[in-house]
Image (cartoon, rainbow, N blue to C red):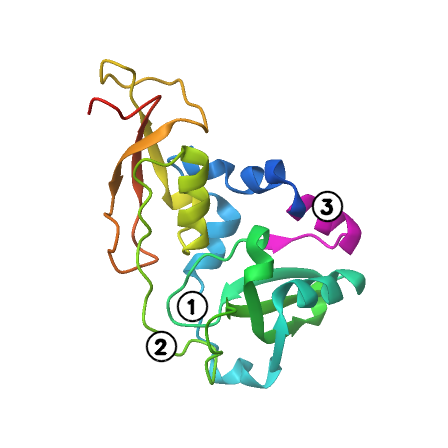
Amino acid sequence: MSFASIPWGQTRRVLAGSAAALAILGSATACGHQGTTGEERTESTEVRATDEASVRRVDLPLDTAMKAAADQGKGFSLRDATSLGRYISPAYASRFKACFERQKPNLKAVDFFVVRRSEKCPLRVGDDMPPGTTPKVLGVTLRKAVHQLVEAGFAPDHISVDTLDAKGHKTNERHWSWEVCTQNPTAGTPFSAALKPKLVVKASCSGN
């Protein structure tokens, strides 16, 4: 996930609002892939030997690293520091730490390679780490389900949603407050960046 070079105060206000977080996740209901996130995901998290010299270990809270980049007028992108290829949303910056950074002077930008604060930084970018699991989102609101899936590392444009009316027929009507009645993959499935979670939501799952 990348941000343009904008002042940190503006960046912080954008990331702090729940409406902004949903804007980041808004593509969750789309079937197609979005260019920016798709392009970043397909790039291997491993750093080629020729790039290693440009990678520097930083070990900073991610929000601190983001603020420093923004204060210097730099754009930045967020990438998984491990081999898992998890999607990193800036909406959850406070829950991550930057292990490494790679400066891109020609673009006036920096790549941050990150892990969750509860995880140890790998010795080098792209090292293996055991995958987490798919969270259980059955019975929760669509809003909460999407937040949980994205926080787990699933890219928003990999998440699809089918909406059913009271009679079980597909409908174009959709509300963030509707309940998740079916999820695939099921809770506990080992995380893989290749998985494409699918949710089925209704106004209420009672009576299913």
Are the residues at dot 3 and dot 2 in contact (C-beta closer than 8 Å)?
Answer: no
Numbered tag placed on residue 13 in the rendering: 3
Identity, as a three-letter code, of the amino acid under mark 3: Arg
Q: CA distance from mark 1 to mark 2?
A: 13 Å
Mark 1 or mark 3, which has the lower sequence index?
3
Residue 168 showing in the rendered view: yes
- Quadrant of the frame with the N terminus: bottom right
Residue 176, given in percent of the width and then of the height, sits at: 46, 29
Q: Residues within 10 Å of mark 1 (few under 14, many from 20)?
A: some
The residue wearing badge 2 is: 128
Mark 3 residue element? helix
Displayed quadrant of residue 108: bottom right
Q: Residues within 10 Å of mark 2 (few under 14, many from 20)?
A: few
Is 13 a magenta residue?
Answer: yes
Q: Is residue 19 above or below residue 111?
A: above
Q: Is residue 145 above or below residue 190?
A: above
Identity, as a three-letter code, of the amino acid under mark 2: Asp
- Quadrant of the frame with the C terminus: top left
The residue wearing badge 1 is: 44
